[in-house]
Amino acid sequence: MKLYQDDKDIIKLIHTIIYSDNRQFAKAFRNTAVSGIISESALETSAGIQSTLGKNITSLQYLKPGGSFSIKKWFSNSAETGWLFITANPSQRATLCPLISAG
C-alpha cells in the first residue's frame, strides 16, 4: 500500500480501510499482492475483506506515531536474546497466524 509506505500514518491507514468506499478501497490496494481479490468489480468480496480488516486493525490506533520499534529488525538482530509472547483469543488466531508463524 503506497499510501502507508509514503508517510506511515496509521490513522490514515485505518481510516482508508474502514471508511473508504469500494473504489477508494480497491485503489489503495492496487499493485499489491491482494489486488486480484480486492477490486472495484468484486464489490461483495472487497466489502467482506474491508469488514474483516476493519474489525481486526482498530487497535492499531493506539500505536505511537513515529515509533522506531520494528519486530522484523528485533528478530534479525542476532545479539537480541529476548522473547516475544503473542497472546490471542481463539477468534483472533487465524488473523494472527502469519505473525505468529514468522518467528
Image (cartoon, helix red, strand yellow):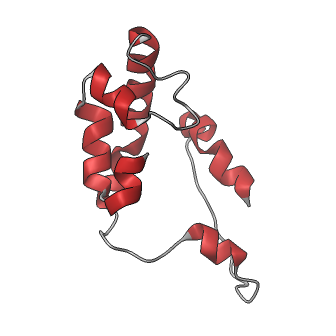
Viewer-nearest residue: 46 or 26: 26
Quadrant (top left/top right/bottom left/bottom right) for the N terminus: top left
Side of 75 relative to 34 (left or right): right
**Residue at position x 25%, y 50% from top?**
12
Above or below 24: residue 2: below
Side of 26 relative to 36 (left or right): left
Viewer-nearest residue: 2 or 70: 2
Question: Farthest residue in the front direction?
Answer: 31
**Residue at position x 74%, y 61% from top?**
103
Q: Position of residue 45 (x, y in %)?
A: 46, 14
* Count of numbered circles on the image: 0
Would you identify the image quadrant in which residue 17 lies? top left
Above or below 4: residue 53: above
Would you identify the image quadrant in which residue 57 lies? top left
**Residue at position x 63%, y 76% from top?**
74
**Residue at position x 33%, y 45% from top?**
58
Q: Position of residue 53 (x, y in %)?
A: 43, 34
Viewer-nearest residue: 73 or 5: 5
Q: Position of residue 42 (x, y in %)?
A: 44, 11
Above or below 80: residue 46: above
Viewer-nearest residue: 49 or 41: 41
Question: Farthest residue in the bottom direction?
Answer: 79
Q: Position of residue 67 (x, y in %)?
A: 38, 74
